[in-house]
Amino acid sequence: MRKQPPISEMMKMHLKDHSSIYLFVFVLFLMGVIFGAIIVNSMNLSQKEDLFYYLNRFFGQVAEGKVASSADMFHQSFFHNLKYLGLMWILGVSIIGLPVILVMLFIKGIVVGFTVGFLVNQLGLKGFLLSFVTVLPQNVLLIPAFIIMCSVAIAFSLKIIKQLFVKKSNSLEAPFTLFMRYVIVFLFIGVMAIAASGFEAYASPFLMKNIVELVSK
């Protein structure tokens, strides 16, 4: 029985074999972020004022402590991220969902770019500080999670296509082995989502309240 290489070695091999996929996915996400920032600049004054009005109301609620409990925020954030990542995972299994996975990642980039861009556009340096404590912390984990999930889903689909259309070869892995690795990756991504949601629910509100008080001055 052939001995399995260490996990660290397997990760290095995976990144080396699929570096082009990771690069493509990262660039696609970055394009989404840029596009989101462009949308902010293309909005007219009335649209910006309407959106900023609702943002100010939210700031007021945060300053007064009228926000959902940390437990509720955690459940809402975690299940939202898990559903999004889970859909990516399922689309990777389906093979035909590859274009949808790319669109989902691009949309995620747009959301991040628009959120940060709007805060900076309306509040300047204070908006940057606000986005730094409300958007960046959880996304330090979530963005890599989405990029990894998207890349692995693409790689898995391509391998399954190869299994279906290429004649049997000793170099091809068994479908069950591929699927189990795919499941393990999703479990790992799930742990990252838990950590990100925990920070968003328990740390971000405290940091946000302090920055909102600074913004209000």
Image: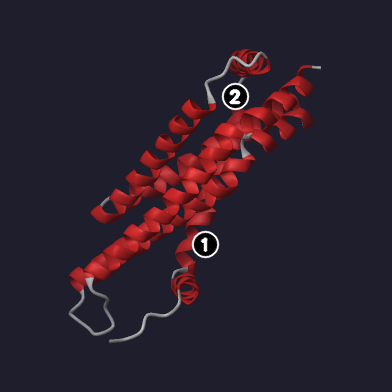
Disc 2 crowd, CA 10 A, few/some/many (<14, 14-19, 20+): few
First in sequence: mark 1 or mark 2? 1
Residue 105 in percent (x, y) is at: 45, 46
Q: Amino acid at mark 2?
A: Met
Q: Which dot, 1 or 2, sits closer to the camera?
A: 1
Can you say whether 58 is above or below 136 in the image?
above
Q: Is residue 206 left or right of residue 97?
A: right
Q: Which quadrant is home to the C terminus?
A: top right
Frontmost residue, 47 versus 115:
115
Q: Residue at x 49, y 59 (%)?
A: 24
Q: Position of residue 109 (x, y in %)?
A: 52, 42
Q: Position of residue 53 (x, y in %)?
A: 62, 13
Tell me if I can see residue 12 in this picture: yes
On screen, residue 73 versus residue 170, left or right, reads right
Numbered tag placed on residue 8 in the rendering:
none
Location of the N terminus by quadrant is: bottom left
Q: Secondary structure at mark 2?
A: loop
- Would you say 113 lies left or right of 170 here? right
Marks 1 and 2: CB-CB under 8 Å? Answer: no
Q: Check disc 1 and report the residue beneath it.
A: 23
Classed neighbour count for the residue bearing mark 1: other residues with Cα under 10 Å, few (<14), some (14–19), many (≥20): few
Q: Residue at x 27, y 76 (%)?
A: 173
Q: Is residue 72 above or below residue 32?
A: above
Q: What element does badge 1 sit on? A: helix
- Residue at the disc numbered 2: 43
Tell me the quarter of the picture where residue 158 sits.
bottom left
Q: Is residue 110 above or below residue 50?
A: below
- Residue type for callout 1: Leu
Q: Residue at x 45, y 63 (%)?
A: 21
Q: Residue at x 35, y 48 (%)?
A: 88
Q: Is residue 6 above or below residue 178?
A: below
